[in-house]
Amino acid sequence: MADVKKIAVIAGDGIGPEVVAETEKVLKRTEELFGYQFETEHALFGGIAIDEKGTPLPQETLDICRSADAVLLGAVGGPKWDSNPKELRPETGLLGIRKALGLFSNLRPAVVFDCLKDASTLKPEVLEGTDLIVVRELTGGIYFGEKFRRETEQGQEAVDTCAYNVNEVERIVRQAFEIAQKRRKKLASVDKANVLETSRLWREVVIRIAQNIRMWSLSMYW
């Protein structure tokens, strides 16, 4: 008997419910074909949670996610909530759940299948052979830095603070190297080190870790 894996299902807003409904069908078929067992529990999140619970990230939803083995999330947000104050915006809930669950790594694979390369607006010869993974840090930086507005002689000024510490950079960089080692052993680090102090820290950490890891190719871009 296979272990039962508990999955928190968050349909969210917009196209989210439609996409998640189809994904649950895939989970069901996976159970039938491979003998896995999934136990799903649905939770409110984002705009619909604001409408029904008065907050984009209800405590009940967070508790369900923390007790689950995985979280299946559809989509959040929409024009309906665009004019809401910051604390009542769906995206605030998204940042909150990332931080609460420690979801610091966003992996975005980009693969082009030969049978679909002619369906893109880009030239097939440009797309052909594309197979990469973008690794993005999710719980630090400007999204989570201090934000405020202040009055100046030139009018109101908005400030968004971008801050990273070494630990935040190291953990995402190490994961990127681990992924690259299992693929083509090539890693490209993209920063703005010629201007930003946070990028200079990033570059220093990347170079330091690279020196202790056997890689075929490390490229730096800014």
Image (cartoon, rainbow, N blue to C red):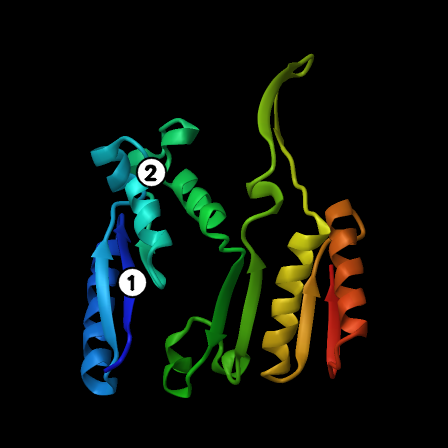
User: On screen, 115 above or below 137?
Assistant: below
Badge 2 marks a residue whose secondary structure is loop
Residue depicted at x 67% and y 42%? 163
* Residue found at x 36% / y 63%: 70
Q: Nearer the viewer, mark 1 or mark 2?
A: 1
Q: Is residue 125 left or right of residue 51?
A: right
At a point 53% along the width and 80% down the height, the residue shown is: 130
Name which residue type carries label 1: Ile
Residue 104 placement (x, y as % from top left): 54, 55
* Residue 133, picture quadrant: bottom right
Residue 118 appears in the picture as rendered: yes
Q: Amino acid at mark 2?
A: Pro
| Quadrant assignment, res 38 | bottom left
Q: Residue furthest front?
A: 1
- Judging by the rendered image, the residue that carries numbered circle 2 is 56
Position of the N terminus by quadrant? bottom left
Ranked by sequence position, the earlier of labels 1 and 2 is 1
Q: Position of residue 82 (x, y in %)?
A: 36, 34
Which residue is pictured at 56% across the width and 40% down the height? 144
Q: Quadrant of the C terminus?
A: bottom right
Tell which of 128 and 194 is nearer to you. 194
Label annotation for residue 22: none
